[in-house]
């Protein structure tokens, strides 16, 4: 069984995907982490994330980089959004994601193009979304808890800019698959979102 969970940044898709993987006993891949690793590697290389050659070269990042906590930072998230617009980068990471999705028994993958590009044959597709303000507020609270000083307004502007890049790119734009269950988490807390998502998937499978 393959479960595809797509959506914009800070929508709650990662939290939901992890919960679904645990509930159904499936391995989970946060595909956004791969793009974050590429963005981080570009910076470590002293390259330009907007240059397709620099971004492609960074796809050769070491696996150990995926364990770097700094990948979760807002700075690297912005770099990931910039390198992800390059078709060459998306192609380089495609096979890695595809192999994970097709492993025996299935998997849960979350990202921005799982249901449309990586695993269009997924048994269940969720498109998780929320208002820009709510997504920014969640990220701001998360960063405040980690004692990182940044304004809510700055995060909101960054998220809006990332949305525009993700939706507007020519290759694999962020969008819900025609057969995806669109799941708005704006008014849900973490536990509500997880419970509703599990119920939606179980109903779909039934």
Image (tube, grey):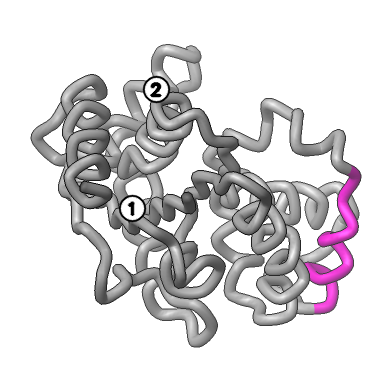
Whether residue 132 can be seen here: no
Q: Which residues are magenta?
A: 53-62
Within 10 Å of disc 2 (Cα), the crowding (few <14, some 14-19, many 20+) is few
Q: Residue at x 49, y 87 (%)?
A: 170
Q: Which one is nearer the viewer's eye here, 155 or 95? A: 95
Picture quarter containing residue 38? bottom right
Residue furthest out toward the left:
187
Q: Residue at x 26, y 76 (%)?
A: 178
Give the percent coordinates (x, y) of residue 104.
66, 48
Whether residue 9 can be seen here: yes
Ranked by sequence position, the earlier of labels 1 and 2 is 2
Q: Residue at x 14, y 40 (%)?
A: 186
Give the percent coordinates (x, y) of residue 182.
19, 57
The residue that disc 2 covers is 142
Instruction: Determine whether, in the image, residue 186 is placed left or right of residue 80.
Output: left
Residue furthest out toward the front:
206
Q: Which mark is residue 24?
A: none
């Amino acid at each position: 069984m393959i479960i595809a969970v797509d959506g914009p940044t800070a929508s709650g898709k990662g939290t939901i995907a992890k919960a679904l993987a645990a509930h159904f006993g499936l391995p989970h891949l946060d595909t956004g982490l791969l793009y974050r690793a590429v963005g981080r590697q570009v910076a470590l290389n002293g390259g330009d994330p907007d240059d397709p050659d620099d971004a492609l070269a960074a796809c050769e990042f070491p696996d150990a980089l995926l364990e770097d906590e700094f990948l979760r930072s807002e700075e690297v998230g912005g770099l990931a959004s910039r390198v992800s617009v390059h078709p060459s980068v998306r192609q380089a990471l495609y096979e890695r994601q595809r192999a994970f999705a097709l492993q025996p028994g299935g998997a849960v993958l979350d990202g921005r193009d799982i249901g449309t590009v990586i695993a269009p044959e997924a048994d269940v597709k969720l498109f998780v979304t929320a208002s820009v303000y709510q997504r920014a507020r969640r990220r701001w609270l998360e960063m405040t808890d980690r004692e990182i000083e940044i304004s809510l307004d700055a995060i909101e502007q960054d998220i809006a800019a990332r949305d525009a890049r993700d939706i507007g790119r020519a290759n694999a734009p962020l969008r819900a698959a025609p057969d995806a269950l669109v799941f708005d988490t704006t008014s849900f807390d973490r536990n509500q979102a997880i419970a509703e998502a599990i119920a939606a998937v179980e109903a779909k499978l039934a």
